Amino acid sequence: MRDARVKALIILIAMFSAIGASAQMPNPYGPPINLEDAKKVAAAAAAEARKNNWTMAIAVVDPAGTLVYYEKMDSTQVGSADVAIEKAKTAARFKRPSKAFQDAVAGGGVGLRVLQLPGAVPLEGGIPLVVEGRIVGAVGVSGDSSDHDGLCAQAGASILK
């Protein structure tokens, strides 16, 4: 019985260590992103999509997950509209890229607990937006594979300083 408890404890510690690598960003929340900057983020994400001939829906939210700006490229699948917004909300509210949740689920075990977190979408493509060390919102992108969505989201997030 004691050996089983020790093994369980070791497994839990190992899993928490793995999940810890994708822990929330230490950055505090800052003032919400303004419309002008949200449009710049979306434009950079859309430019990455166009460069690769991908069609995307792009959402930018404030730190609370409230939609600030949204656009959908022509011919983007309809379902991507909601997914982009939810990816952005996930990244803003949980202070980490939505890919962290995707990785946790892919790891199985205790990582599957992510599926019970209200509002946590475990799909790559949501990235917090950081200005002067503060999270001002997040960008969410959907329309192609998750890794392509992530590349476009990163392109958008990268233009803010």
Image: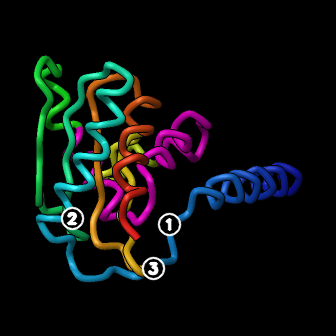
Give the residue number, with chain letter if any, for mark 1: 24
Image vertical order of residue 159 relative to residue 140, above or below? below
Q: Residue at x 43, y 48 (%)?
A: 154
**Residue holding disc 2:** 37
49 up-or-down from 19: above or below: above
Which secondary structure class fits the magenta region best?
A: helix
* Residue 40 percent coordinates (x, y): 23, 56
In the foreground, 10 or 105: 105
Q: Earlier in the sequence, mark 1 or mark 3?
A: 1
- Secondary element under disc 2, as helix, strand or loop, is helix
> How many labels sit on residues?
3
Residue where numbered disc 3 is placed: 133
Residue at image location 65% in from the left, 58% down from the top: 21
Magenta region: which residues? 84-113
Q: Residues within 10 Å of mark 2 (few under 14, many from 20)?
A: some
Q: CA distance from mark 2 to mark 3?
A: 16 Å
Q: CA gap, disc 1 to disc 2? A: 23 Å
Closer to the N terminus: mark 1 or mark 2?
Answer: 1
Residue 96 lies in magenta, yes or no?
yes
Q: Is residue 50 magenta?
A: no
Label 1 sits on what residue type?
A: Gln
